[in-house]
């Protein structure tokens, strides 16, 4: 008897339906959204935006990006009560399929430096079609060049590839935005980590 693939063996439609349901118009309550930090959260409020590109440099319309970050003081949120008290969740998810340009975006605060690092960063997980195992990377910030130059993880990446991890700060009419794209393959491939 032959069995079909289980949900853990394929990305399928499961992440859109189960993990970003509200974004895709399903009548479910999302535990995690694109809002990582509410208006009351302490720190510099920013938006992180970008797109995911495949090996042929085409935008991917069915990827899901998940981020996890420290708050403005460099502390990770550990309990649901933290969200109610501080307005900071620390976790966000965004599918690329509902934006006309297949982008992802997160409304958050710029993270502080965590205890065992020297530069602020955001942890990133990429889920998408054809990937049975998700990919891990980080986003750093281009206006933190001095701290980035001391960060052990960033400095462990070959110099010519470090820019694939650094988001560009842009002043927009709606506020500060950091832009970074994720390239899954090719000459501009983003650095991914084996964790």
Image (cartoon, rainbow, N blue to C red):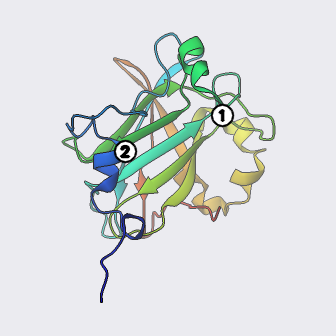
The residue lying toward the viewer, choosing from 111 and 26, is 26
Q: Secondary structure at mark 1?
A: helix
Up/down of 15 relative to 45, above or below: below
Residue depicted at x 67% and y 35%: 120
Q: Quadrant location of the C terminus?
A: bottom right
Up/down of 99 relative to 64, above or below: above
Task: Specify the quadrant of the image occupied by residue 50.
Answer: top left
Q: Secondary structure at mark 2?
A: helix
Residue depicted at x 50% and y 52%: 125
Indicate the position of residue 107 as horizontal and vertical percent values. Answer: 43, 26
The residue lying toward the viewer, choosing from 69 and 156, is 69
Up/down of 2 relative to 94, above or below: below
Indicate the position of residue 82 as horizontal and vertical percent values. Answer: 61, 20
The residue lying toward the viewer, choosing from 170 and 151, is 151
Farthest-out residue, front: 1
Q: Nearer the viewer, mark 1 or mark 2?
A: 2
Tag 2: Cα neighbours inside 10 Å, few (<14), some, or many (≥20)?
A: many
Tag 1: Cα neighbours inside 10 Å, few (<14), some, or many (≥20)?
A: few
Residue marked by disc 1: 144
Task: Specify the quadrant of the image occupied by residue 194.
Answer: bottom right
Indicate the position of residue 116 as horizontal and vertical percent values. Answer: 81, 40
Which of the labelled discs sits on residue 170, or is there none?
none
Q: Quadrant location of the N terminus?
A: bottom left
Residue depicted at x 47% and y 17%: 38
For marks 1 and 2, give the CA distance. Answer: 32 Å
The residue lying toward the viewer, choosing from 4 and 38, is 4
Residue marked by disc 2: 19
Up/down of 16 relative to 188, above or below: above
From the viewer's perspective, is 148 left or right of 7?
right
Residue depicted at x 77% and y 39%: 118
Indicate the position of residue 106 as horizontal and vertical percent values. Answer: 42, 32
């Amino acid at each position: 008897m032959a069995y079909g693939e289980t949900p853990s063996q394929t990305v399928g439609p499961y992440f859109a339906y189960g993990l970003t349901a509200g974004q895709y118009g399903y009548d479910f309550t999302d535990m995690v959204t694109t809002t990582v930090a509410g208006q009351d959260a302490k720190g510099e409020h920013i938006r992180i935006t970008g797109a995911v590109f495949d090996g042929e440099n085409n935008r991917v319309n069915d990827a899901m990006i998940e981020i996890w970050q420290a708050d403005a003081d460099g502390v990770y949120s550990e309990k649901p009560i933290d969200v109610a008290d501080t307005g900071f969740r620390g976790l966000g998810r965004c599918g690329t399929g509902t934006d006309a340009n297949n982008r992802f975006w997160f409304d958050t605060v710029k993270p502080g430096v965590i205890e065992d690092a020297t530069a602020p960063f955001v942890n990133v997980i990429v889920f998408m079609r054809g990937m049975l195992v998700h990919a891990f990377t980080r986003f750093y910030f281009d206006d933190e060049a001095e701290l980035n130059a001391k960060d052990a993880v960033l400095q462990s990446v070959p110099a010519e590839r470090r820019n694939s991890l650094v988001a560009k700060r842009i002043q927009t009419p709606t506020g500060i935005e950091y832009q970074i794209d994720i390239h899954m393959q090719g000459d501009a491939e983003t650095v991914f980590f084996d964790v």
